Image (cartoon, rainbow, N blue to C red):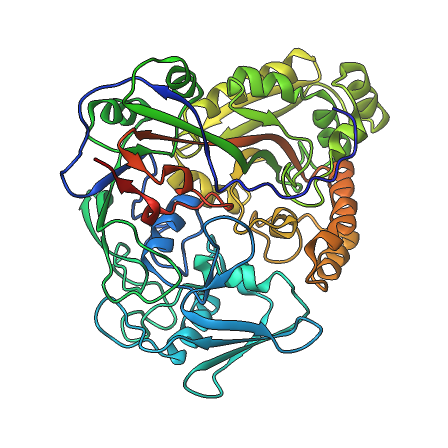
Amino acid sequence: MNRKTLVLPTVVGLLAPVLVACGGGDGTKGKGAIVVGTTDRFERTTDAPAPFDPAAAYDVGVWNVLHSTFQTLLRLPRSGSEPVADAAEKCVWTDRRNEQYRCTLRKELTFSNGNAMTVKDVKFSIERARAIDFENGPVSLLSNIDRVETPNNREIVFQLKTPDATFPQKLATPAAAIVDSKSYPKDKLTSDGFKVVGSGPYTMETEEQDDRVVKAVLTKNPDYKGSVTVQNDKVEMRFYDDAKSMENALKAGDIDVMNRTLSPDQIAGLRSATGQKVKLLESPGHEIGYLAFNVDDPAVKPKAVRQAMAQLVDRQVLAREGYDRTSDALYSLVPSGIPGHLNSFSNQYGDPSVEKARTLLKGAGISTPVRFTLSYSSDHYGEATGRAFKALQKQLNGSGLFEVKLQDVKWAEFRPNAAKGQYAVYGMGWFPDFPDPDNFIAPFFGKDNFLRSRYQNAKLNDLIPRSRQTSQRDSAAKLFQQAQDIVADEVPVLPLWQGKQYVAARDNITGAEWVLNDASELQPWELVRGK
């Protein structure tokens, strides 16, 4: 694909059933809680001592829990990208420059421990996350706040350092989750990493073993006041070591729904199976997979090395061999379906070519083969990850220009090690914090970036704040297209594939088509057990 495209948003919160798959027992019908299976792991470690503390949590799996148990002033709706009021009664810009944002808190909000929520809790929560500044946390989403004011007992005013039209969407993320100021310490993470004191649609109880959550029970919060309509009384989350055992549990009727993470083989099997007990639902997704570079590492510090890799990689083969077409080739950090998407890498490099890659390296005086280790984490990103990176290794080494070794690292070690710059090249995935092109550019570059990368580009650093000055996000598309072209030329990261969204559910479960929204967030309140 070698063309520039501007794609308008698609409604990806609505999943379309692709086939009814194989059967089993009668499921958990009539047995109370709707049971959701996942391969996500929530464990307490030295580097992640408080997995469910909003000041530390910055992972789609954990955020799925936090969205259900905490409130934010705003939240994303069932589908679409425009936030709606939740803990807030309303929120508005009070100036023309997008620098002052005012919210009015709903009346009579309470936390799950019975304490009343006030504007002081909102202010406390924002200032706490910024004060803790957890290394691998979401604080970068709040870094543009200059100060938080509470002029009266109902209003919260955010004064921003610079204009930011995306700020309402940031307030809708768990980075801005409202915690009880009487239950959480002001300047450090909670000592009970699995404790949740929130005011969201559900309260939660967990079962733990060896510092790991093995089961979480979400119970409808009778005191919740917000924009979510909870369709069930209880949802139980069960955590599996691998996708196969999770699938077996679904077919046996031990669980009702599974989402994260289905392997390509499972998806193919569910598509082709017969019977009337389990349905597979598919939709476009905004998850991306990419390579990140430590630009200070001698092996990949020269831009020509990264450009040569971009010239060699065959994304179509990776999507086919690694993910069995359950993902699509990706030629930009901004995925298809997001305003401003542009196939910048395809436009810059064209078809994969060993000769062009050799010319790039030779022109920069770089001896071949270039040697480095590619690190990744299959226990976090799914079983297909290893297969995909083996296919990538084959492409790079097969050119004779690279000599790449692979290293699979447990996520508990991988994420902090990557942030500390211990890997030259490493595979990462990204689910958007919110569905806007800004969230596929800004988190990767500039100060306080998600990767802790030292890569800097003055033009990128100028484009990002300029794009935030307009509330009409489609009109910012040209600026993001410039940003994507810069990334394709500099290659501080190398986009590889764009994932699709899959949910498998027992056929007596309704609402599964709404269980993921436009940011791939789990919405368990949509699930209903039919007769």
Residue 394 in which image quadrant: top right
Give whichever of 314, 524 is nearer the camera. 524
Give the x, y percent position of residue 214: 22, 41
Is 311 situated above or below 423? above
Whether residue 50 can be seen here: no
Whether residue 387 can be seen here: yes
Residue ID at (19%, 43%)? 33
Is 170 situated above or below 372? below
201 relative to 484 in the view: left or right = left
Q: Residue furthest left?
A: 31
Residue ID at (19%, 29%)? 27
Is 16 situated above or below 316? below
Residue 200 in which image quadrant: bottom left
469 relative to 372 in the view: left or right = right
Q: How many numbered marks have been drawn onto this rendered protein structure?
A: 0
Q: Quadrant of the N terminus?
A: top right
308 relative to 21 in the view: left or right = right
Give the x, y percent position of residue 435: 57, 48
Residue ID at (30%, 22%)? 244
Give whichever of 7, 456 is nearer the camera. 7
Is 278 situated above or below 233? above
Give the x, y percent position of residue 109: 32, 73
Give whichever of 206, 312 is nearer the camera. 206
Residue 276 in which image quadrant: top left
Give the x, y percent position of residue 138: 49, 56
Residue ID at (75%, 35%)? 5
Q: Quadrant of the C terminus?
A: top left
